Amino acid sequence: MIKVGIVGGTGYTGVELLRLLAVHPDVQLTAITSRKEDGLPVADMFPSLRGRVDIAFSSPDKADLKQCDVVFFATPHGVAMAQAPELLAAGVKVVDLAADFRIKDRAVFEKWYKIEHTAPELLDEAVYGLPELNRDAIKGARLIANPGCYPTTMQLGYYPLLKAGLIDAGSLIADCKSGVSGAGRKAEIGTLFSESSDNFKAYGVQGHRHTPETSAQLARYTDQKVGLIFTPHLVPMIRGMHATLYARLTQEIDNAALQALFEEQYKDSEFVDVMPFGSHPETRSTRGSNMLRLALHRPEGTDTVVILVVQDNLVKGASGQAVQCMNLMFGLEESKGLQQIALLP
């Protein structure tokens, strides 16, 4: 059994990890930390886990994380970089769901996240945990930088086109929407029910932290200079993410060939569903599951391809993807413990 520790078990990604790992056949939940909730049984805070998780939260100073095989950090930015070096030195593998190791350039990280990076020696070693594009490297990793939710949709949407050299990488446009849970489990005016319900708005238009992360990853797949305009929006739902991606084709290709390109690329990726050309994937078709669905469109008379991508921002966009990485790191089937079907209605 894989002994698992979770640092930060009270947030949305933390409880999502608990939900997934509680029924994983090869996992033993060993430690769940929370300084504020020290001693409180996990199931008392999250009744959905009654009968599944029988341990209590423990403060970080009491939890012996070095006895774990892998530790997930479901914490604010800056926590993993402070604790990862000691855990790695003790032979513990680390999966960080925050952004501490996603951006290789220390100066770029510090510019966007406004904190000092205290473990720069680990930036080169950290493996970006997007299994569909980085599977082999993840298998041999001991430190995983779990991708951001928006970057997951953008990369999986653009990758086949960039790899084939079919689009202008300098004129990418991503129009993306996320449910309120993407903002985390904290009290803020903008995410109160009365503020977010019956409302729709853009944010981060001048610049968003996921832009440098996505651009740096996309640059790995093309010799062109990447130019990405990314605009996120907040929609009045709890879970779900919808990305509408635009790219200008630079070569002649028919719609059937475009569809075949994506189907071939993701034929061995269990959690990427390439829907029939012209489909309209819905966020509810992925709710509670680790599935990402996408569909291609080609507006008539244009040289533009439109890619529609949906996922659950807390599962494939965060905790489910982290479990995918754990499975690969320990030589398990990538889909183990992640077979949940989306909830409808």
Image (cartoon, rainbow, N blue to C red):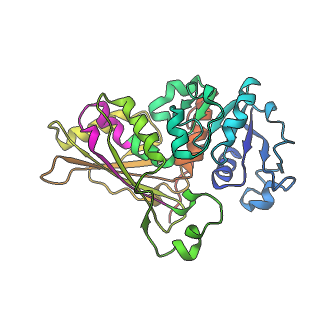
Residue 134 in view, yes or no: yes
Q: Measuring from the top left, give residue 290's x and y in whole percent.
A: 53, 47
Quadrant housing residue 30: top right
Left or right: where 251 falls relative to 130: left
Height in image: 189 above or below 228? Answer: below
Task: Based on the picture, tell me whether residue 93 belongs to the magenta stretch.
Answer: no
Q: Which residues are magenta?
A: 157-178
320 over 220 or under it: above or below: below
Left or right, residue 136 beside residue 255: right
Quadrant where the N terminus sits is top right
Count of numbered marks: 0
The residue at the far left in this view is: 301
Q: In the rendered view, does 32 fall on the left or right side of 160?
A: right
Is 162 covered by the magenta stretch? yes
Q: Position of residue 328 (x, y in %)?
A: 58, 30
Q: Residue at x 82, y 56 (%)?
A: 37
In the visual, does 259 lie left or right of 24?
A: left
Q: Position of residue 335 (x, y in %)?
A: 56, 38
- Residue that appears at 74% across and 56% down: 49
Residue 331 visible in the displayed image: no
The vertical placement of 300 against 223, above or below, is below
